[in-house]
Amino acid sequence: MSARQDIRQQLNGYQEIKKEMEICQKYGQDYRNQKGLKAAVIDRLHPRQLELTVSEIITENTNTKTLRLTAPGRTLPAFLPGQYLSVTVQIDGIRTSRPYSISSSPAQTAYYDLTIGRVKDGFISNYLLDEVKVGDTLITSGPLGHFYHNPLFHGKKLVFLAGGTGITPFMSMIRTFTDQNLDLDMLLLYGCRSVKDALFLTELTERAQRHPNFKFELVLSEPAPGDQGRTGFIDANLIKEVVDDIGGATFYICGPSAMQKFCTSQLESLGVRRRAIRREAFMAPGDVLEDPAWPQDKSAEQPVTITVQRPSGEVLTIETRVGEPVLTALEKAGLIVPSACRTGECSMCRVKMTAGEVFQPSSALVRQSDRLLGYIHSCRAYPLSDLTLVIQ
Amino acid sequence: MTDFDVVVIGAGNGGLTAAASLTKAGIKTLLLERHNIPGGCATTFCRGRFEFEVALHQLSGFGQADNPGPLRGFLSQFGIPDRCEFLDMENLYRLVLPGQLDITLPANREGTTRALVERFPDDKEGIEGFIDLIYRTFFEYAAVFYQRDPEASAEKYPLMTKYSLQPTEQVMNEYFQNPLIKAALGMYWGYSGVPLSQLPFIDYASLYFSYLQWKPGYVRHGSQAMSNALLEYILANGGQARFNCGAKRILVENGRVTGVETDHGEVITAKAVISNASSIDTYVELIGEEHVPEEQFKILGGQTVGPSSLTIFVGLDCEPQEVGITETTNFIISDPDTDKQFAAFSRLDTDDDYLLVSCYNLDDPQASPPGTSQVCIVDLKYAEPWLTLSPSEYLQAKFTAADGVLKRVEQVFPGFRDHIEEIEVGTPLTHMRYLNSPGGAIYGFDQYAKNSNFFVSPTSPIKGLALAGAWSGPGGFQPSLTSGGSAARAIKRYLQQLEEGK
């Protein structure tokens, strides 16, 4: 040891560097002064959690309301139009979360609008529409998601394909880009049942009148007598008719998964490249049964048992059914598993499966090494058999 | 009786190998990680049909089964070479200085020498002499510090004595003057973040020796595969791990570690703690100044937070060759002077930056789906200018900076931009968020000679505390992986002493 100690000090330049080190220590920084600063920087941009106050509830139509959310005592993080918040709720002792796109523009930082449509038998949407009052607090994530106009490669011609409440991220984009007079050419094809189901119609009409670079068309699947607009679905023929430079456009799809799949195939049939088709996964748990890869011999109602092993040695047994995502079953059993996107992409709800078989739709983006070791994204994993999970 | 013998805070490279080393020795260990996945830097993420490698570009010191490097030996104790598939890269890198230099160096001494002599025939002697010096200096260094020659002396090891602490550029000047040769033989400077004018020659020689001797390596399915395999080893050997569970405080009584309080407010008692958090966070945030000797803050204060990076992850909808990418590792520069390249670390703009463009598909066709390519662009940047931006300016600056980088890449790889199918941009603040490191630093402190373990001891003044990861020594995969082994050895000695009642 002493030999090495010696030789270290014999290295040419050793004494000079030692002196330099001493000077740096003498006149250097005091990192104690930076206590808490890093956490503040991170919290300003990407808070782990936001406590938002419902400051106003705007009725959009019989089944849709906008919750206007403010953050007393802090600045709301900036976001890109198209991003979402994951809202965590506790209902009847069950803690769960749902993603909702922000429909307001980030140009103002006073509030976030979440526009929520009623989902048939929707556990969360019914709660948010019927129970939440002005003055209530909602726990949410910070803004998340990758469904936004990316100037690095999306170009200037944007075509928005919206289905139903899938209009919400586009409202944020349209509001932002028209208000800021950005040099973008926007076309919205808005699919809904009938005119009375179309959200934000007055505002869309007004913005289209004021901004020649924004146009929109309603596409009605079940028009009521007297409804103005195109009828049918957003298909290749319609797109060909209304989009003049298909190769130069970027298409954004947000709507129910059946609509997404249909529109994607229509765009592909027109030769639109994959890079120009951007999708916000927007799925109801039951949609999985329509997935072409779903094993046809499996009934959603078939009962299965999930066994959960905890590091403490505790073992939980949960009775559920094939058609229910694993995460939902865990939440109903009172387990707290972090989650955000609930479409299988963000990996927050990743858990390890040591026995059993699950179905994960292709939209579940599971890392390859995770897949090999049995990790699943529980929000989009359906138990095809009894399962054993290890939750650390 | 404590809950655990040792709590390891953070499942980055150093935390994982520390926990693996402890569990291997039968020590009751708990690994805490604030994220939901192990790895820290050593991770991947998915976008669309791509899985992106976050940090691993060229693994050093791993080698092949018949030519094993030191890292292979170290990771073998945990069965990693059998649990993961390691791939070799055949070249060090291609360097492009548009209009002036375009050269590819093979990953072996003869090939690199030949490529350089072919391009710079007038400097044949200097190039050969310099490469020889890299080897001879490194061998001397290894004899003293790895093989621990008991009779080491300045006379016996003259090259090591003379050159180790000299700035690399000064050593190069003894052999050649052409700035293009210095650039061609200097591009790995970015793997330490210190320009050639200040990079200690021994750090430089170790880098080049390691890559020439053992070739750069890569892990199939990315570094996440290695992180996952290390966690598997820990759990299979009786270790425990908790994810989504960070540490709020390291508990210290009378100068001795007594446990950890988690973010959830739970107190876990332990005889010792290994912190894979940054040393600044460990002392300032986790332990608290009342328990830390003043001297320790002086040692920290003599060091400066190193660079972070603007990292751009790109999925292309074509094969690499279609846009002219023919090598896994590419450096693009606009000036051969590494001081100028380094100066750009402190600026927001990206017009002249030193860029690393890695395309994993060349050595691993499975790096992305057939007919596509996975590309990662690294542009080293300090966090400071990013910290002054308002949140909305920040979002804009991120796109502007990335746009500048893509223009430079497009110049060398025409058509690149038109093939982008997915892109994700990480700034120094993104790295700060995910790594929770000061300044989003990826190598820990600036790696100047005065900050090396020659001068700063990695040991802690708190009894029962050891540090692992880039902040306790050099940065990069190989050093941070092995740092966990050193931290575990120190803690094993400490536990032994406790047992003996010392």
Image: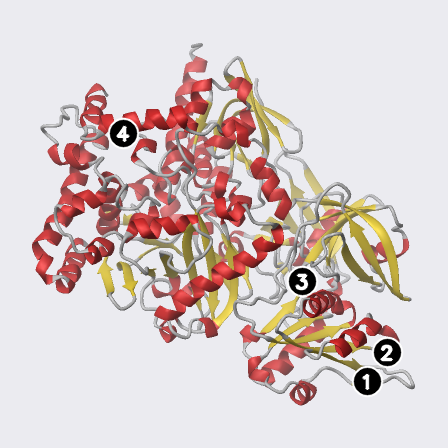
The residues bearing labels 4 and 2 have C-alpha atoms spaced at a distance of 77 Å
Q: Which chain is mark 3 on?
A: A
* Label annotation for residue A140: none
The residues bearing labels 1 and 4 have C-alpha atoms spaced at a distance of 77 Å
Q: Which chain is mark 1 on?
A: A
Q: Which chain is mark 4 on?
A: A
The answer to whether dots 2 and 3 both sit on one chain is yes
Residue A1 in view here = yes
Q: Secondary structure at mark 4?
A: helix
Percent position (x, y) of residue A68?
Answer: 81, 55
Q: Earlier in the sequence, mark 1 or mark 2?
A: 2
The residues bearing labels 3 and 1 have C-alpha atoms spaced at a distance of 27 Å
Q: Earlier in the sequence, mark 4 or mark 3?
A: 4
Q: Amino acid at mark 2?
A: Val
- Residue carrying label 3: A81
Q: Secondary structure at mark 1?
A: loop
Q: Give the quadrant of residue A272.
A: bottom right
Alpha-carbon neighbours of circle 2 within 10 Å: few (<14), some, or many (≥20)?
many
- Residue carrying label 4: A17
The answer to whether dots 4 and 3 both sit on one chain is yes
The residues bearing labels 2 and 3 have C-alpha atoms spaced at a distance of 25 Å
- Contact between labelled residues 4 and 1, with CB atoms less than 8 Å apart: no
- Contact between labelled residues 1 and 3, with CB atoms less than 8 Å apart: no
What residue sits 54% from the left and 73% below the top?
A275
Percent position (x, y) of residue B497?
Answer: 41, 15
